[in-house]
Amino acid sequence: MNHEMPQSESTDSTRPSWAAHELVALALTVVLAVWVVAQWSVAVQPQANTERDEKRAATMAELGMADKKALNTFGVVDESLKRYRIPIQNAMTLVVELGATNIAKEVAGRTAAPTGMKLVEIPDPDFLADVSELNDPALIAQGKTLFLTKICFTCHQNDPAVPAPAGLALGAPKFIGDFWGKERLVHKGLGGPLERVVMGPGYFAESVSAAGSGLRVLKGALTPMPPPPPVTEEEVKALMAYVRSLSQGN
Ligand code: HEC
């Protein structure tokens, strides 16, 4: 029993002191690490934050000033289009004075006719006694066939999924969307003065007739429509009924 005691004492006394050293070293390392990180974050982060904050504040102030300026001063938006802006306060007073409907008309008028050009009325063709004739499903079906056989489809896209490459090259209008009864800007003769017409029976018949080709050329088209294969009046009526049926408004 006595023999064992010193052995156990000596081990007990050496082991704890060794472990204590290690613990102290570890603790020191941790403290040092924490201190370094703390120093670094104090030194670096706040500085980055203030810099960013300052920049952000400056940008916000700049944007705010630009907004205020745009909203509260007179200015030129586009010289060539003669578009100018007025302070929002004046604009609001104007809207109240003129009424929203008149403003809408005024704006629409401007975009359709930048120089106040006249709207030319093209009378309905003689062969069309009444527009309601164009609702006839049999006539529309006949027109659909003619649209293929008279090769209209090669230039006038009428299906969003099927492009008409020849028409793309010439700038031919697509018969897609809401187009019937809408205004068109046309040149009187290729490159001639502009006028306004309505896409309706008169303009349609004129465009498809051999004599009418080149008389009025849709703005943006590269050539007048080449004279199509000859069509009779009855066929023009059928084509008209079909093309009109493609328009969303009908
Ligand atoms: C070779 C291509 C080509 C073919 C084929 C063709 N067109 Fe055209 N069409 C044009 C071009 C280009 C224009 C625009 C120039 C113009 O107004 O003359 C046009 C314009 C029109 C317009 C005036 C439309 C608008 O929105 O202003 C109508 C209507 C029309 N075509 C109907 C037809 C019909 C119907 C056929 C078939 C009988 C046909 N086109 C065949 C090229 C073509």
Image: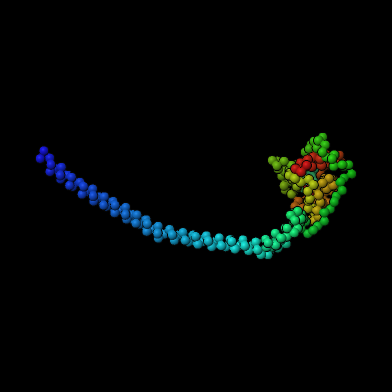
Whether residue 136 is situated above or below residue 168 in the rendered picture? above
Residue 210: image x %, image y %? 85, 46
Residue 180 found in image quarter: top right
Image quadrant holding the N terminus, namely top left
Q: Quick check: can you spot residue 110?
A: no
Residue 34: image x %, image y %? 34, 54
Report the side of 240 relative to 169 (left or right): right
Quick one: 102 or 113, which is closer to the camera?
Answer: 102
In the image as oriented, which residue stretches furthest toward the left? Answer: 2
Residue 241: image x %, image y %? 81, 40
Whether residue 12 is situated above or below residue 81 in the rendered picture? above
User: What is the basis of the colouring in this image?
Assistant: rainbow
Residue at image position (76%, 43%) is 249
In the image as oriented, which residue stretches furthest toward the bottom? Answer: 74
Residue 126: image x %, image y %? 89, 44
Quick one: 217 or 94, which is closer to the camera?
Answer: 94
Counting every numbered tag in the picture gives 0
Residue at image position (56%, 62%) is 61
Report the side of 38 relative to 144 (left or right): left
Q: Quick check: can you spot residue 242?
A: yes
Whether residue 153 is situated above or below residue 69 in the rendered picture? above
Image quadrant holding the C terminus, namely top right
Report the side of 158 relative to 43 (left or right): right
Residue at image position (70%, 42%) is 160
Quick one: 120 or 186, which is closer to the camera?
Answer: 120
